[in-house]
Image (cartoon, grey):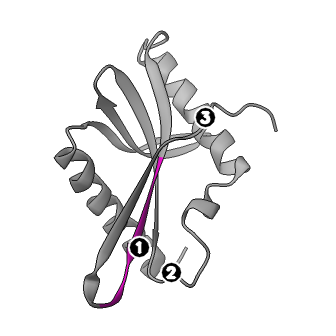
Amino acid sequence: MSDKRISLGKQGEAIALQYLSSKGYHIVATNYRTRCGEIDIIAAYREALIFIEVKTRKSRFLDSPLAAVTEKKQRSISIVAQEYLSRNKKFNSDARFDVIAIHIGNFGKKSIEHIENAFDLCYGH
């Protein structure tokens, strides 16, 4: 992955963290990694744990950030989320999977789209 893409991703995650905090979400973890993958943000909101994938794009003319959360990516996030719940003994916690799509336009103009319950727990290969 190029340094530009890594920088853009980190910028998007910082924007998402600020957005979530302003909405009353409590940030539990960022860039949570296991051998099976990574979850960008884990947050608590009301009584639920929220596993959040952040996708950031510079141009609206390229593929949608949401299109980048493929079935394969959903499976990876699901596996990591299950590991997190198991390791932290949160078996009976309400949980959901959200996607935050961020577009950074000309002159730094930003738009944020937050899709709650963007996908369900995904099993299989």
In this view, the residue in front, 120 or 27, is 120
- Please name the residue that numbered disc 3 is placed on: 78
Q: Is residue 49 above or below residue 64?
A: above
Give the mark toward the camera: 2 or 3: 2
> Badge 2: how crowded within 10 Å, few (<14), some, or many (20+)?
few
Q: Amino acid at mark 1?
A: His
Residue at the right extreme, as displayed: 125
Query: Magenta span has 38?
Result: no
Q: Which secondary structure type mostly characterizes the magenta part of the structure?
A: strand
The image position of residue 112, as x and y in percent, is 36, 63
Q: Disc 3 on helix, strand or loop?
A: helix
Count of residue discs: 3
Which corner quadrant holds the C terminus?
top right
- Please name the residue that numbered disc 1 is placed on: 103
The image position of residue 1, as x and y in percent, is 55, 73
Q: Is residue 15 above or below residue 62?
A: above
What's the magenta region? 99-106
